[in-house]
Image: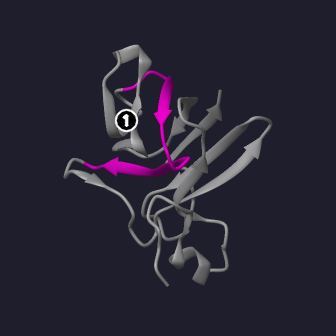
């Protein structure tokens, strides 16, 4: 099976084997060109740096930082405001996102036991992230994404 990275959701094979078929390794959300989104960091229980990586096919602008277009961005919870507005530029209508972390040895992501649970609550998507805990606690980071 050929995966279209950044074009469709990827579910975690590790958690599927454990009977959890809803754990995302990589999420893809449909968006419009010039769509504004709001990321709101809720909490983290992980000791190292924790963040999320966002990417579109045409780039992302963080209006509070000016008009620079970033091909992809990583929002680190410890270096970002609690709430971040992003402007998504796209021709294919896809926003890719997944959780990342750094224990002091460089950025890590996409391990076998990595995953995100996502739940739609009102007009927001609520994410709970698991870095590499094989028990699947999903308490390393929680954040929300709202399309404005």
Residue at 49 percent across and 24 percent down: it is 84
- 134 left or right, relative to 74: right
Question: Residue reaching furthest front?
Answer: 91
Is 65 situated above or below 79?
Answer: above
Magenta range: 80-103
Q: Position of residue 12 (x, y in %)?
A: 53, 71
- Magenta span has 81? yes
The residue at the point 56 percent across, 42 percent down is: 142
Image position, residue 137 (x, y; %): 57, 59
Q: Position of residue 90 (x, y in %)?
A: 48, 41
Q: How many marks?
A: 1
Where in the figure is residue 38, as x and y percent of width and height?
A: 57, 28
Q: Give the side of residue 144 with respect to residue 5, left or right.
A: right
Q: How is the image coloured?
A: one colour
Question: Vertically, is 55 above or below 70?
Answer: below
Q: Is residue 42 visible?
A: yes
Residue placed under numbered mark 1 in the picture: 76
- The residue nearer to you, when weighing 104 against 147, is 147
User: Is residue 54 something that shows in the picture?
Assistant: no
Q: Is residue 79 magenta?
A: no
Give the secondary structure at mark 1: strand
Residue positioned most to the left: 105
Q: In the picture shown, does residue 96 fall above or below 135?
A: above
Q: Residue furthest right?
A: 122
Secondary structure character of the magenta stretch overall: strand
Residue shown at the point (38%, 67%) measured from the top left: 111
């Amino acid at each position: 099976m050929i995966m279209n990275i950044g074009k469709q959701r990827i579910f975690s094979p590790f958690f599927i084997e454990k009977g959890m078929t809803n754990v995302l390794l990589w999420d893809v959300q449909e968006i419009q060109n010039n769509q504004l989104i709001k990321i709101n960091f809720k909490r983290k229980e992980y000791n190292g740096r924790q963040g999320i990586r966002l990417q579109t096919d045409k780039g992302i602008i963080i209006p509070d930082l000016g008009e620079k277009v970033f091909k992809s961005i990583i929002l680190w919870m410890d270096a970002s405001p609690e709430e971040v507005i992003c402007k998504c530029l796209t021709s294919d209508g896809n926003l890719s996102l997944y959780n990342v972390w750094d224990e002091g040895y460089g950025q890590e992501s996409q391990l076998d036991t990595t995953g995100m649970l996502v739940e739609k609550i009102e007009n927001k998507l609520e994410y709970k992230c698991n870095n590499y805990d094989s028990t699947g606690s999903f308490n390393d980071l929680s954040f929300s994404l709202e399309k404005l």
